[in-house]
Image: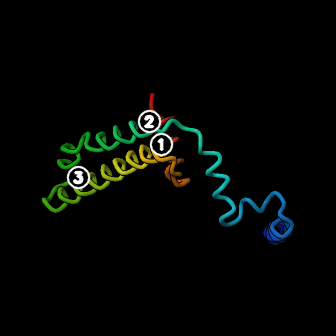
Amino acid sequence: MVIALGLAIALFISFENGAIASPLIGSNFLPLVAQAENSFDSDKAADSAERASEQIYEGLDQTKQEIGKTEGRKAVIQKARDHASDKWQSLAEKARTARDSDAELSPVDQHTLKHLTESEP
């Protein structure tokens, strides 16, 4: 209890003084994420996202056979894979649009693309 109270007071004082802890509170954290995630190759990231949208369908028939025992389940599995594929395609398009128009990607999109490209061989 004492530790929690001390931490709360320290965060409040740090926040009020603009010290070290304040970037970790609220919306002040997002610019730090954006700065840290800004370094990735948008062409490679867009290609990786497109490959991910295609890889979503790998093993679909086996999944439908093992998990989708009814037609309703099979339809839901197909719909979920379609939705995931569409999301990856959308992210690939955002990356290409950002590259071509100097637009900014959201910190979440930047983070996702950066880690997607880093995870590929």
Q: Residue furthest top?
A: 121
Q: In the displayed structure, would residue 26 be above or below residue 56?
A: below
Q: Are marks 1 and 2 in contact (CB under 8 Å)?
A: yes
Q: Position of residue 36 (x, y in %)?
A: 64, 45
Q: How many marks?
A: 3
- For the N terminus, give its image quadrant: bottom right
Between circles 2 and 3, the one closer to the viewer is 2
Q: Residue furthest left?
A: 71
Mark 2: give few (<14), some (14-19) or many (20+) Cα within 10 Å.
Answer: few
Residue at image coords 22%, 45%: 60
Kind of residue indicated by mark 1: Arg
Residue that mark 3 sits on: 67
Location of residue 16 (image quadrant): bottom right
Upstream in the sequence, badge 1 or badge 2? 2
Nearer to us in this view, 96 or 76: 96
Q: Position of residue 89 (x, y in %)?
A: 34, 47
Residue at image coords 23%, 52%: 67
- For the C terminus, give its image quadrant: top left
- Describe the element under mark 2 as helix, strand or loop: helix
Is 115 placed left or right of 81 in the picture?
Answer: right
Q: CA distance from mark 1 to mark 2?
A: 8 Å
Between circles 1 and 3, the one closer to the viewer is 1
Upstream in the sequence, badge 1 or badge 3? 3
Q: CA distance from mark 2 to mark 3?
A: 36 Å
Is 57 placed left or right of 100 in the picture?
Answer: left
Q: Residue furthest front?
A: 101
Kind of residue indicated by mark 2: Asp
Residue that mark 2 sits on: 43
Residue at image coords 67%, 52%: 32
Q: Which mark is residue 99?
A: 1
